[in-house]
Image (cartoon, rainbow, N blue to C red):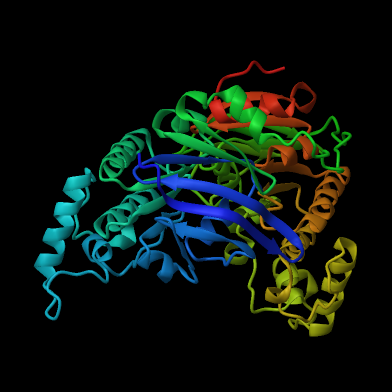
Amino acid sequence: MSDQPLVEMRGLEKEFAGSKALRGVDIAFHRGEVHGLLGENGAGKSTLIKILTGVYAPTAGQILLDGSPVRIHSPLDARRHGLGAVYQDAELVASFTIGQNILLGNEPGHVVLSDRAIHDEAARILNEIGVALDPRRSAAGLSAAQMQLVTLATLFHRRYKLIVLDEPTARLSGVESEVLFRLIARLRGEGITIVYISHRLREVQEICDRATILRGGLVSATLERGEITEERVTQLMVDRSRTDLETYNDGHARPEVLLEIDGLQTDLLAPLSLTVRAGEVIGITGPVGGGMEQVAHALGGVTRHGGHLRLRGRAVDVADPVAARRAGIALIPEDRRKQALFPALSVADNICLPVLRSLRRLAMIGSREKLAFADGVMERLAVRPRNAAAQVRFFSGGNQQKVVIGKWMGTKASVYVFVEPTSGVDIGAIKEIYDIILHLARDGAAIIVVSSSLREILALSDRVLVIHDGALVSEAPKAAWTYDALLAVTMQGRHRRTA
């Protein structure tokens, strides 16, 4: 490993609407190393990487490449400098083949493009890195894991100097993960730098030469391989000077069992059984992509699943989202813009979509009725600005999340399933959203919160479940958990006896 860093960031700062996500970060990535990047959600990892890859511009500070200052204005700039990233939700040109995606913009043949030459070269690249995929296969039918591997093959082909891997094993099977680790070793041997972001400490210990821990927008420490232990990393990740979230669930559960889940399973989730009482908040956490999301997707009818559900003692079938809604289950997904809102429609249109039947009058739905209904919801949830006629895309992330919750409140659902409820939400709106969730519990709804934020889980839950690698590894009342203990189980996936 060279003494001269390949990439060095000095005094990096990034401010969003008066809030600093990075507060003077100094970090160096050396040529040919695998460098882990760890930290709680909100610690600054994503912001740092987006600055490095040209998605964001820093508010202050500088980036040096091979010792010389560079300005990275866009992802295209980053690519020209040999800096790239593979994200969890890797996207390819669906209408192209695997081979065409790998060589896109760098095809052999120059003036006259040869289909055979493209796919022969792609086959050579895939074989070289040990990915068993047919280069002539359409990209449209690939799984998320296969898309990640193809994207990585693309960056390998283009000889990037530094590649960021963001939670790379979150959607990979054990066999696919082994393929990835072999590929990382191959890239490292070629002198390529890998920045490895993961919540899975065992992987970091196994493959990383060094690891940097971020906390509150600052570098907490950089550890050598032998120093990367559970105790040390946990100590560095936890900001003990931070006050706990002000919101606290002091208990609203009633004796009545509202939801019974028996053997719920998907391709990525082992059979899971539990009951949720009226007014109870169940928190489900674990590594991103480790299976916790599958619970929400199955209950919301988004993904195929097995098992049985009973709601208020009656068997229900949630084969699809419409069936889930009719059964009385409301899913509030993480990606509200793509999965829960129509950005070009007004707040009123969005809020009223699930309850249009009840607003019909003589087969007509008047704008006055919609605006009045939506205004009532906005008042109750403190949505700002209080303009039901405005397009929802002009509202902040926190107010958009309130709109999503508000549209399901109108259906008077029995079960609310929240996935990362404060993802992308400004600090001022977090407590308001927490208060809304607890208000639903006080009204007698059953609540399931799926979140990778441990502070969020501990603030909201009556009971906490940890799912790791598709299996339930721990379940206990909130009172049985400390933050450090929950962090350790989440990262290591160790079983803990139910209290």
Vertical relation: 157 (above or below) 213: below
Would residue 240 be found to the left or right of residue 274 on screen?
A: right
Vertical relation: 3 (above or below) 66: above
Taking depth in this image into account, of 483 and 473 the one nearest to the observer is: 483
Q: Residue at x 63, y 36 (%)?
A: 285
Q: Position of residue 220 (x, y in %)?
A: 64, 38
Assign the C terminus to one quadrant of the image: top right
Taking depth in this image into account, of 224 and 315 the one nearest to the observer is: 224
Quadrant in the picture for residue 56: bottom right
Would residue 134 be found to the left or right of residue 479 on screen?
A: left
Q: Position of residue 494 (x, y in %)?
A: 56, 21
Viewer can see residue 57: yes
Assign the N terminus to one quadrant of the image: top left
Would residue 115 be found to the left or right of residue 339 on screen?
A: left
Would residue 82 be found to the left or right of residue 254 on screen?
A: left
Quadrant in the picture for residue 184: top left
Viewer can see residue 258: no
Vertical relation: 69 (above or below) 495: below
Vertical relation: 296 (above or below) 69: above
Q: Residue at x 27, y 71 (%)?
A: 105
Taking depth in this image into account, of 126 and 318 the one nearest to the observer is: 126
Taking depth in this image into account, of 241 and 485 the one nearest to the observer is: 241
Quadrant in the picture for residue 67: bottom left
All told, the count of numbered labels is 0
Q: Position of residue 243 (x, y in %)?
A: 83, 39
Q: Position of residue 14 (x, y in %)?
A: 65, 60
